Image: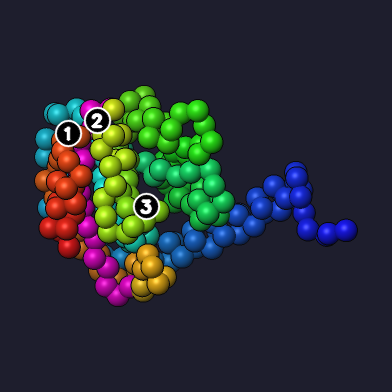
Amino acid sequence: MSDLPHGPDLNRWLDALFVGTNATLFALHRIVTPTARVHFREPFLPADAKHDGKPLIYMTWHRLNYACMPVFLSLPPEARPTLIMHDGVASRAFSHRSTVWMGFESFVFRRNSNASPREQIAAYIRSTGRPILNLPDSGGPYGVVKPGILEVARACDARLVPFQVTAKPALSVGKKLQHVIPLPYCRIDVRRGVPLSGHSSVDDCQRALDALA
């Protein structure tokens, strides 16, 4: 008979493991973030955002996910975007707890729901008015905008705000995705593009992000 946990025992075993992985990631952020120097080339919040009243969807490439954390933590709490996650193992292992401990709001969509992830995210934005972070190439192919973000933006009349970050010194981790991991005392430069309407095209979004590289 196998001694591996199963059923409820497996869930308890995984929960204990996930506390450890989230704590490790949180500790790394706590080392880097206080020493990082964040420089905005232009104000991160669009000048007309408060008067416009439309929700904002900040978008950048997946590989910059970790490098964005010091950027967002330098903003006032109300301006920090909600981080979108799913209920799968990978998301639970690396982000569910650590991001909350860092002071972020998070929204976890259910992958096996009758409502699609896009519908769930749009409903969250409509009900809260909160800005969110979206990684339009999540899941690959990387560096290529996929249309899902536009469907969300149209469903809740949101504006898309493209941005890019550059961290030096930093590590590049992974062969395919090449996550950018900022190191202590790094400088993080932030470039924000012109906000786009939810009625923009995928090509518009691609060009906007590519122009910030």
Say which residue label 3 marks.
Answer: 138
Q: How far apart are labels 1 and 3 at the CA level?
A: 21 Å
- Helix, strand or loop for disc 2: helix
Label 1, residues with CA under 10 Å away: few <14, some 14-19, many ≥20: some
Amino acid type, label 3 = Ser
Residue type marked 1? His
The answer to whether residue 83 of the structure is visible from this angle is: yes
Is label 1 in a helix, a strand or a loop?
loop
Q: Residue at x 40, y 72 (%)?
A: 175
Q: In the image, residue 200 lies at what x, y percent?
A: 15, 38
Tell me: residue 145, above or below residue 126: below
Which residue has dot 1 on it? 199
Find out whether residue 119 is within the magenta segment: no
Is there CB contact under 8 Å for labels 1 and 2?
A: yes
Q: Which mark is residue 154?
A: 2
**200 or 56, which is in the foreground?**
200
Q: Which residues are magenta?
A: 156-170
Residue at 37 percent across and 41 percent down: it is 82
The residue drawn where x is 39% and y is 44% is 83
| Closer to us: 106 or 152 | 152
**Is residue 73 shown to the viewer in this render?**
no
Q: How is the image coloured?
A: rainbow
